[in-house]
Image: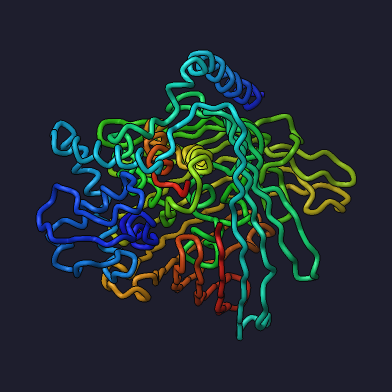
């Protein structure tokens, strides 16, 4: 987590003159009282009073200008921890109460309000892509721009509506609009939220947590973790329960859903949230995870559904069971971001058309998909305090999807190496470039340079 | 048929759970409002903010948004990241105390 703190712009409350004359932790250093003082200020200010800070900051200094900003910011967590462990200490209580009192006097910290009013928040991103390849015949091009608005509507303390549109320009210049999710969340209690509508699939970690371009370290998704193929569910339409709770020093999370389930397409199961159920059998699935420490998570996923064959012009189609299991992990300690995910799915033998215009259905044999990736990224703030260098984050990823069984579904097979570097201008504004080498069983290898600029807001 | 029964059972479990908890928690809704005047809650929130938010993405500057905006965004992330409710409320209290209003 600390490498992400390194990105954070200096907070306005911290931009006053700072006296670093204190060389021991504890009392809050003095600064320009004209600025409002939130508790964050006191937390960070106490960080600044540590011996390390005293050795590195001239007096007076502006935190936002200091090259060690990222390094000192990461002390916030440790200091908050320290404050909490000293909660019985009169000194700590005094520090906090003093800061709070100053806040109140300056009108800085708005009092929390119980409310049943509607609050609307617009967030999201605009994304621009470009790609160049000298090997696969597609040459160079600027990809379609994407506008990805997310509208959040809160109503009181327990209701939240989330909608996410994807508005993109395709290669023909047409504008495409799709609804990625639209869900109503009822926050029942501290560990249970009920979700209804169309929602991101909770299977694995990439789709629900990492696929957004203002989060993804690389311009592309891992092979097999896209709409095409049969391994990685994208969205689901139905009901879901989810939440998290403490277990000892760790945290456990869960998500379980029942939904309309996937349908069969020409390239395999389409694992999307359809607005209807073509076979009156609901899909069920979910994920559980455990975080023994905040920077390490391991998760297990499973899903099961019945899929109806694509109807042909004549003849009966059948249903088959689709099952999926998966495992994932993430380590985000220090400036590292190390992740991996594995998904394996199976579809039983099924009578289905290959495409909607087929006169008769075909018997499609049992087919198995395996998709996985491993990714390592490192924020250079860990090795350099230079403002520019610290915002670079190189990443490397290997991803692979393999298919065994029905040959028509095997076109999605691929293994890919991705070597990229991101430059984080702001926490959600990033320029990424990546060189990718993709190998296909039945086609020549492709080498491609991808660029992406994302402005998250 | 078996899958249909399982689906119905899961649906019933979800809806039953929601109904069972809703009456109790609605009555407690006032207690769920972050008490941003509690310095210890804000300190806990600062720690949780640095630990939870950075698991997936860069941490956003608390000064980017208003307190009410952070209240909605906090709930959005609580659902998305399965953050325990008490922890999410601490984070919300911290963000509100350091927001741009």
The location of residue A280, given as percent across then percent down, is 73, 29
The location of residue A303, given as percent across then percent down, is 55, 38
Is the N terminus of chain B in the top left, top right, bottom left or bottom right quadrant? top right
Indicate whether A40 appears above or below A20.
Answer: above
In the displayed structure image, the side of residue A378 where residue A176 appears, left or right: right
In the picture as drawn, the residue positioned furthest to the bottom comes out as: A134
* Residue A118 location, quadrant: top right
The answer to whether residue A267 shows anywhere in this view is yes
* Residue A30 location, quadrant: bottom left
Indicate whether B48 appears above or below A11.
Answer: above
Residue at the image point whose x is 56% and y is 40% from the top: A323
Residue at the image point whose x is 41% and y is 49% from the top: A328
The answer to whether residue A271 shows anywhere in this view is no
Residue in front for this viewpoint, A281 or A26: A26
Residue in front for this viewpoint, B87 or A240: B87
Residue in front for this viewpoint, B89 or A334: B89
Residue at the image point whose x is 74% and y is 38% from the top: A275
Indicate whether A332 appears above or below B30.
Answer: below
In the displayed structure image, the side of residue A2 where residue A280 appears, left or right: right
In the displayed structure image, the side of residue B49 where residue A367 appears, left or right: right
* Residue B91 location, quadrant: top left
């Amino acid at each position: 987590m600390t490498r992400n703190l390194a990105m954070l712009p200096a907070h306005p409350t911290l931009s006053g003159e700072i006296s670093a004359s204190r060389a021991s932790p504890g009392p809050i250093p003095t600064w320009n009282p004209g600025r409002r003082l939130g508790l964050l200020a006191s937390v960070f200010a106490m960080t600044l009073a540590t011996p390390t800070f005293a050795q590195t900051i001239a007096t007076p200094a502006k935190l936002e200008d200091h090259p060690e900003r990222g390094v000192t910011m990461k002390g916030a967590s440790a200091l908050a921890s320290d404050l909490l462990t000293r909660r019985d200490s009169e000194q700590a209580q005094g520090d906090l109460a003093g800061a709070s009192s100053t806040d109140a006097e300056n009108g800085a910290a708005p009092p929390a309000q119980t409310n049943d009013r509607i609050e609307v928040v617009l967030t999201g991103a605009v994304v621009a892509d470009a790609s160049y390849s000298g090997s696969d015949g597609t040459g160079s091009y600027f990809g379609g721009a994407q506008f990805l608005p997310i509208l959040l509507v809160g109503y009181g303390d327990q209701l939240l509506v989330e909608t996410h549109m994807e508005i993109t320009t395709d290669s023909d210049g047409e504008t495409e609009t799709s609804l990625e999710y639209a869900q109503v969340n009822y926050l029942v209690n501290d560990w249970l939220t009920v979700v209804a509508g169309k929602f991101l699939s909770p299977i694995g970690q990439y789709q629900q947590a990492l696929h957004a371009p203002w989060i993804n370290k690389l311009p592309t998704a891992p092979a097999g973790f896209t709409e095409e193929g049969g391994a990685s569910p994208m969205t689901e339409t139905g009901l879901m329960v989810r939440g998290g709770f403490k277990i000892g020093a760790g945290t456990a999370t869960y998500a379980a859903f029942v939904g309309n389930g996937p349908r069969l397409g020409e390239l395999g199961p389409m694992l999307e949230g359809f607005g209807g159920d073509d076979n009156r059998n609901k899909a069920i699935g979910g994920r559980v995870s455990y975080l023994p420490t905040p920077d390490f998570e391991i998760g297990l996923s499973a899903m099961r559904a019945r899929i109806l064959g694509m109807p042909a012009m004549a003849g009966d189609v059948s249903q088959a069971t689709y099952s999926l299991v998966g495992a994932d992990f993430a380590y985000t300690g220090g400036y590292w971001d190390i992740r991996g995910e594995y998904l394996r799915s199976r579809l039983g033998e099924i009578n289905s058309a290959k495409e909607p215009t087929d006169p008769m259905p075909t018997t499609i044999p049992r087919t198995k998909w395996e998709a996985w990736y491993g990714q390592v990224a490192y924020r250079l703030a860990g090795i350099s305090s230079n403002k520019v260098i610290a915002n670079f984050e190189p990443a490397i990823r290997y991803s692979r999807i393999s298919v065994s069984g029905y040959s028509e579904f095997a076109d999605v097979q691929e293994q890919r190496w991705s070597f990229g570097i991101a430059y984080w201008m702001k926490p959600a504004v990033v320029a990424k470039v990546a060189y990718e080498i993709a190998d296909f069983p039945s086609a020549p290898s492709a080498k491609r340079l991808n660029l992406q600029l994302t402005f998250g807001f | 048929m078996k899958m249909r029964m399982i689906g119905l059972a899961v649906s019933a479990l979800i809806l039953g759970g929601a109904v069972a908890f809703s009456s109790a928690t609605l009555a407690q809704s006032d207690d769920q409002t972050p008490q941003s005047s509690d310095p210890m809650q804000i300190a806990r929130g600062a720690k949780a903010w640095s630990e939870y938010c950075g698991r997936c993405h860069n941490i956003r500057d608390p000064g980017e948004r208003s307190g009410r905006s952070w209240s909605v965004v906090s709930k959005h992330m609580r659902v998305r990241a399965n953050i325990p409710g008490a922890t999410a409320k601490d984070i919300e209290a911290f963000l509100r105390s350091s927001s741009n209003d």
